[in-house]
């Protein structure tokens, strides 16, 4: 058994070495394709995460005009609370808003603004569900004491839009490149079949099992795909970590929680190997078994 | 049918390559176990095609072909390799691997049919001894004479100790002396019980080592009188 595996692998290895440049082309293309798909995929899931967070958190920020008295405040709060679909209203004073911002961004110098606080008073309005958000926002905005209502629907729309752009981008760039990588793997296998046509015909002549004949070819394709996947995983992991570090140092977004290198390596290497295997099986079916 | 199964039995076997080109037409013949057979005929008479039907390199288009009573048409593509292990094939070109030594050529074939390294170490000298080429085990094919290369090819065909050996023009490019050496080798294998079929148009050799001749002409088996009936 082990002896058999060794035979198959040493056959595959000698081909990989013979086609070193073709293998290089196939491997790098697959790596690039998987890198592109991997990063787009990461951004996509990142956005999905945000979207679902947004969709769970039905909140409106309602900003008040300046200089309201206590009575107007209470009246407006009651009015908002009376709108069907609103579950709670929390008052956030302009001083509180300033403090919160200052705490969240300790690096930004705000001393100039101490005496001229640019933040307005506001309400955090909690809703029952996302469906009525736009309508409720509209009716709150009609009130005289209200300056502006912000909900996340613009952000949400933006995120959904960017997701569909990502999908398109993924299919066009990553997909096409993956296809090219597949054709390159196919071609290396065809080259191998050509270079080894004597060996292959001798194998057939002496009655070698199909697995002995096509096994090394399929392994060769799988190895190419796997190396491509591995490279893509390492590159992607590096990218995510540096983006994460950058985001953290800017402090605006917080980190992006990069997928662990181990997971990336596992997923992309397996995907690559599987893909390479499919391409080489395709080549074997067309070039060896037909003959 | 008599008690003993014939080794090979063809009944009106034809191979039609296209509308105009037929490799074999209505070939019927019967070859017993342990026989030594010459398949003679001019270039293009269908010798190789007939052998390829037996090895399932070519599928016959009509008729019935049996080896050891097994219908070749019923051998599944996935089982062709098992059929091939029951026969040794020496192709018209020797088909040796030029970048491998003599012993590696035989070893590679053994590895290909699933033998372990250990078995290879054990079997290769035996096989090379059998075809009398052990002394050149470390040579590359290009360093060998045509006759020596042919020995290696025959040795490689014998790796599974098959009961049937099929050699397509084994003496084609050899001088008489080497040809005789090869023929002696084939006769020896035959004497040990292997059924041997040799396609050739080397008449001096046939005269020196007389055996039953099946003569082919234009894809048919030539029968001067009708003594040789193929259908049993
Ligand atoms: N794959 C093929 N496709 C089409 N025609 C073929 C094919 N193989 C053989 N033929 C034809 O079948 C006929 C018999 O060929 P075959 O090779 O059997 O002759 P042969 O007796 O072995 O000749 P030689 O002594 O030159 O080896 C020839 O006319 C040949 O052109
Ligand atoms: Mg021929």
Image: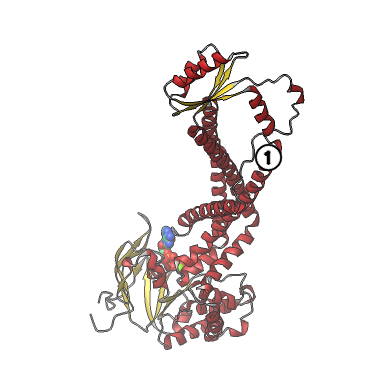
Would residue A65 appear left or right of B80 to someone viewing this image?
right
Q: Residue at x 42, y 76 (%)?
A: B87
Specify the quadrant of the image occupied by residue A246.
top right
Would residue A232 appear left or right of B206 to someone viewing this image?
right
Residue A221 in percent (x, y) is at: 55, 56
- Ligand 2 shows up in the quarter that is bottom left
Q: Closest to the observer: A191 or B14?
A: A191
Disc 1 within 8 angstroms of ligand 1 (CB): no
Q: Residue at x 43, y 88 (%)?
A: B192
Q: Closest to the observer: B59 or A255?
A: A255
Q: Outermost residue toward the front?
A: A70
Vertical side of A185 occupied by A70: above or below: above
Residue at mark 1:
A248
Residue B203 in percent (x, y) is at: 46, 78
Chain identity of mark 1: A
Mark 1 lies on a secondary structure that is: helix
């Amino acid at each position: 058994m082990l002896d058999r595996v060794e035979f198959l692998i040493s056959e595959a290895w000698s081909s990989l070495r013979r086609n070193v440049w073709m293998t290089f082309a196939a491997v790098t293309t697959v790596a690039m394709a998987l890198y592109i798909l991997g990063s787009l995929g990461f951004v996509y899931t990142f956005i999905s995460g945000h979207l679902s967070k947004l969709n769970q958190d039905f909140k409106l920020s309602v900003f008040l005009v300046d200089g309201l008295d206590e009575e107007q405040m209470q009246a407006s709060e009651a009015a908002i609370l009376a709108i069907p679909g609103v579950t709670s209203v929390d008052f956030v004073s302009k001083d509180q808003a300033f403090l919160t911002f200052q705490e969240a961004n300790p690096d930004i110098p705000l001393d100039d603004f101490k005496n001229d606080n640019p933040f307005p008073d506001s309400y955090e309005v909690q809703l029952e569900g996302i469906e009525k958000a736009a309508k409720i926002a509209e009716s709150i905005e009609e009130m005289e004491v209200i300056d502006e209502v912000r909900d996340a629907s613009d952000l949400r729309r933006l995120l959904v839009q960017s997701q569909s752009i990502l999908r398109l981008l993924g299919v066009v760039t990553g997909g096409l490149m993956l296809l090219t990588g597949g054709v390159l793997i196919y071609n290396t296998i065809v080259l191998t079949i050509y270079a080894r046509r004597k060996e292959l015909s001798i194998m057939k002549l002496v009655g070698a099992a199909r697995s002995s004949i096509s096994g090394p070819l399929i392994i060769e394709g799988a190895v190419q795909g796997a190396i491509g996947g591995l490279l893509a995983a390492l590159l992607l992991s590096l990218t995510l970590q540096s983006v994460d570090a950058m985001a953290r140092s800017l402090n605006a977004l917080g980190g992006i929680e990069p997928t662990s290198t181990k997971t990336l390596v596992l997923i992309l290497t397996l995907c690559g190997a599987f893909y390479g295997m499919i391409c080489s099986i395709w080549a074997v079916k067309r070039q060896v078994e037909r003959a | 049918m008599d008690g003993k199964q014939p080794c090979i039995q063809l009944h009106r076997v034809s191979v039609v390559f296209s509308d105009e080109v037929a490799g074999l037409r209505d070939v019927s013949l019967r070859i017993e176990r342990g026989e030594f057979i010459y398949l003679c005929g001019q270039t293009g008479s269908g010798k190789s095609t007939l052998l390829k039907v037996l090895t399932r390199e070519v599928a016959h288009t009509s008729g019935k072909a049996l080896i050891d009573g097994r219908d070749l048409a019923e051998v599944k593509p996935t089982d062709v390799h098992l059929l091939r292990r029951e026969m040794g094939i020496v192709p018209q070109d020797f088909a040796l691997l030029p970048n491998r030594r003599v012993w590696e050529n035989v070893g590679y074939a053994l590895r290909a049919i699933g033998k372990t390294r250990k078995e290879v170490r054990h079997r290769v000298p035996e096989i090379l001894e059998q075809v009398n080429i052990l002394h050149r085990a470390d040579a590359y094919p290009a360093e060998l004479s045509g006759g020596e290369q042919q020995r290696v090819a025959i040795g490689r065909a014998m790796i599974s100790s098959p009961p049937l050996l099929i050699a397509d023009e084994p003496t084609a490019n050899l001088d008489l002396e080497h040809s005789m050496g090869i023929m002696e080798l084939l006769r020896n294998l035959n004497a040990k019980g292997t059924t041997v079929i040799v396609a050739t148009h080397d008449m001096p050799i046939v005269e020196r080592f007389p055996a039953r001749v099946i003569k082919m002409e234009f894809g048919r088996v030539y029968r001067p009188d009708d003594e040789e009936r193929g259908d049993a």
